[in-house]
Image (cartoon, rainbow, N blue to C red):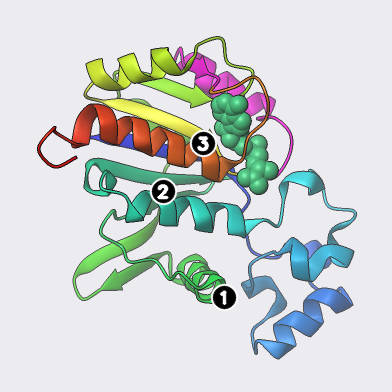
Amino acid sequence: MLKLVFLETSLELVPPSIARHPAVVKDARRRKKKPTKIILDDSKHHAAMKDLDAREKRGRPDIIHQCLLSVLDSRASRFVDIYVHTLDDTIIWINNETRLPRNYNRFIGLMEDLFEKKEIKAGDKVLLKILDAELEDILKDVEAVVVLTEKGERDEKFLREIVRSRDDLAICIGAFPHGDFEEDTLEILEEFEAEFVAIAKEPLTSLYITNRVICIYEDERVLSDRNR
Ligand SMILES: C[S@@+](CC[C@H](N)C(=O)[O-])C[C@H]1O[C@@H](n2cnc3c(N)ncnc32)[C@H](O)[C@@H]1O
């Protein structure tokens, strides 16, 4: 089983410090929700976000929405255990059988429900869950940790080889709009002796990197010659 971990994901509720800003209040009113119960979205709350810390990494839940659809649509999905680590260190587990809304507004509504209830179920089956866990807990029981970054010293050939040779692997991809991983995140990754892989030396999108990783995983582990 592959653990796919999205790091520092730009997904959070509106922080109380900007809950009274007119841009937030207007959006919350329109959606008949409390300002602190809606997901922060740069396209709607831009004016309110200008003084937030680490502002350039926040308010882009569309990035993880696209990445999750890409993983869940793939033929690798049932071999992948999906974790979303957020910028404020929340850990969300996504059941790989979840049929995520393809519509962005519905996805946002689902995430708001998740932050409220901590768990989303369909019948007895848990689909999404906020875990009482830290990033270290997710990485501690794998054989190897690989991090995708344009600054990586390893290349795609190395990624293919490690995917082919290791059964218990965690592959980590950033799901924030700009910039690098935080020092705290890098310290944890280094603690696990992570291998840093660059697909290219230029910055690419989270969606492209997710697609690339999934294709490599499908090639190496999922698709036999017969069902290719
Ligand atoms: C920092 S985010 C930037 C996202 C982008 N602005 C978007 O809208 O998707 C992109 C993530 O993809 C991975 N990534 C980007 N470029 C890469 C590259 N050349 N090689 C390997 N991984 C890369 C890293 O994990 C990085 O954190």
Q: In which of the image's four quarters is ligand 1 placed? A: top right
Q: Residues within 10 Å of mark 1 (few under 14, many from 20)?
A: few
Viewer-nearest of discs 1 and 3: 3
Q: Would residue 21 appear left or right of 58 to someone viewing this image?
A: right
| Label placed on residue 132 | 2
Q: Secondary structure at mark 1?
A: helix
3 in the magenta segment: no
Asked if disc 3 is less than 8 Å from ligand 1, the answer is yes
| Callout 1–callout 3 Cβ contact below 8 Å | no
How far apart marks 2 and 3 lie (CA) works out to 28 Å
Q: Which segment is the magenta one?
A: 176-198
Q: Which residue is mark 3?
A: 209
At horizontal 68% and vertical 72% (from top left) the residue drawn is 36
Q: Would residue 96 appear left or right of 87 to someone viewing this image?
A: left
How far apart marks 2 and 1 lie (CA) works out to 27 Å
At horizontal 28% and vertical 48% (from top left) the residue drawn is 77
Q: Which quadrant of the view contains residue 35? A: bottom right
Residue kind at label 1, given as amino acid type? Asn
